[in-house]
Image (spheres, helix red, strand yellow):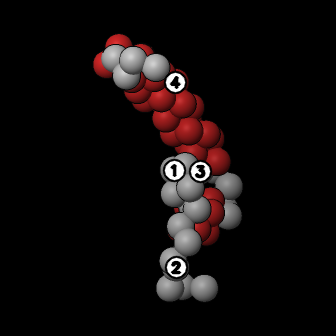
């Protein structure tokens, strides 16, 4: 692999253009449920929050 900057730019564009956008749309669609606040406190955008003090 040549480690050229172009593949990294394309991958970053895909991640921020499609993946993150769809994650934010999912969170907006879940906002209407009453359990959403507890879910949002427990999770991050991509990974769970491992060190919580309110358990």
Which residue reaches farthest left? 5
Circle 4 is placed at which residue position?
18
Percent position (x, y) of residue 33? 68, 55
Q: Is mark 3 on a helix, strand or loop?
A: loop
Task: Name the image quarter holding residue 22.
Answer: top right
Any part of residue 37 in sight: no
Q: How far apart are marks 3 and 1 (CA)?
A: 14 Å
Q: Earlier in the sequence, mark 2 or mark 3?
A: 3
What residue do we see at 53% from left, 67% from top? Answer: 49
Q: How far apart are labels 4 and 1 at the CA level?
A: 14 Å
Mark in the foreground, 3 or 1: 1
Identify residue for label 3.
31
Residue closest to the eye, 32 or 18 = 18
Point out residue 3 in the picture as x, y percentages from the top left corner.
37, 22
Q: In the rendering, which numbered label is found on residue 45?
A: 1
Q: Distance between the residues labelled 3 and 4?
A: 20 Å
Lower position in the chain sequence, tag 3 or tag 1 = 3
Disc 2: which residue: 52
């Amino acid at each position: 692999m040549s480690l050229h900057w172009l593949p990294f730019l394309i991958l970053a564009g895909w991640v921020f253009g499609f993946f993150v956008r769809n994650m934010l749309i999912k969170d907006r669609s879940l906002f209407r449920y009453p359990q959403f606040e507890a879910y949002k406190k427990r999770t991050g955008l991509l990974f769970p929050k491992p060190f919580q003090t309110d358990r």
